[in-house]
Amino acid sequence: MEEIRILGRSRVDGDDHPLELDSKNELFVAQGLPLYTETTRRGNGYSAIATAAVAGLVIRPSTTSAVTLWNGEAAGSNKCYVIDRIFTHCLVGVNAEGRFLMWACIHPSGMTKPATGPIAASATNLTGPYGKTYNGKAVFDIGTTVVANGWYPWGYSTSHPAAGTLPGAAISVDIAGRLIIPPTGAVSLQVVASTNGATFCSGLSWWEEEITLG
Amino acid sequence: MGTETRVLGRVRQDQSDKPPELDGKGNVFIAHGFPTGAEMTRRGNCYSVIATAAVAGLVVRPDTVAALYLYNGEQAGSNKCYIVDRLFSHCLVSGNEEGRFALWACIHPAGSTAATSELAASATNITGPYGKTYNGRAIIELGATVVDNGWYPWGYSIDYEKTGVLPGAGVSVEVGGRLIIPPTGAISLHVVASINDSTYCSGLSWYEEEIKLGL
């Protein structure tokens, strides 16, 4: 079998050097730019946040979501939504010590488009990277009735102030593609809190990509 | 089947040539030659800024006032973008009662208004890696009036000291390039807190790179 040595061009001296391995023959790599630069540069990443706060649940979520993002691309297409992060802002806590945690549920292809007051894309609640306007087919809704397709906790809980009904507490969870919404599928988010008086504005960031699932 | 060729790499330890190894599914094993931020820092185009005066946290979602506004002063139509690496905020004084705070950020598109009351670069508040002086075109303003182009929370909230008016609490969020400021665009930062008498010095780190935005 023919063997070839792969050379790369050094950024430092401009010379060609062989790619280097460690003592276990693992290829050394280096990160040229921050991890998410390329996905952001391509411009198909978007974020949405609820325009109205929803009370946290004090039980595991089931058939009501705080927010739902529905993938409005044509059934059978490959335009998927790759979830980057999910977040929530505690608009008001309750006058008692309490914790809260984010939960998410992926709904498979074939989900009916949410009909109850989807939030229109605007300059302030559904936006793209580097100020790009959203012109995709996502539908973002608050308080949707959904099928319980499996809810799971994400991230770790944090607390809101124990005295007064105060804002300020927040959560942001790196999903990094662990959740993907297929065309006509959706993701629902909900907050589970210690008491039922706390309210939350939840949202998420995602990339819209052509990928074949499976 | 076409011609098969074995690719070789140079083993750093003994300078022998060996094929990179694969796992059972054909994935090539890799090893980080340096910490992930080392190359970006080595190149020297990474900068940080932190506010010189503390700004009170908001008790509502941010909209048209920024605690800190960083404007990309590169020429419109050029490709010199600011890639945001991390955001941070230091609670200079807390509010003598229990409370939480979290960072929020807003990206303003190309064509945004340049910052006016500029925060001058100095050896202590706008600096580069390994002590490099800042000589770029970023303009930083504290308390700027801005357009609400969409604010989102970043990172987890944390609590500040509840007894006394004390410093010490802080947050630092790894953005990792998820936010990019185009030429004549900007980023705004603010803190949302439980009460409105806690104050914060916020800032960020960014890389200045020639990249073409879009697919």
Image (tube, rainbow, N blue to C red):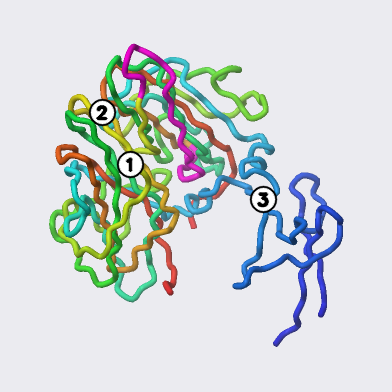
To which residue does mark 2 refer? Answer: A161
In the rendered image of this protein, does residue A108 appear above or below residue B59? below
Question: Badge 2 sits on which subunit?
Answer: A
Residue at image point 62% right, 26% down: B135
Residue A85 is left or right of residue B209, and the answer is: left
Residue at (61, 17) in percent of width and height: B123
Q: Are marks 3 and 1 on the same chain?
A: no
Q: Which residue is mark 3?
A: B32
Quarter holding the C terminus of chain A is bottom left
Would residue B137 appear left or right of A48 to someone viewing this image? right
- State which region is magenta: B160-183
Spot occupied by residue B61 in the image (x, y as percentages of width and height): 26, 32
Q: Position of residue B62 (x, y in %)?
A: 29, 31
Q: Which mark is residue A157?
A: 1
> Three-letter amino acid code at disc 2?
Pro
Of the two numbered discs 3 and 1 in the rendering, the one whose residue sits closer to the viewer: 1
Contact (Cβ within 8 Å) of mark 3 with mark 1: no
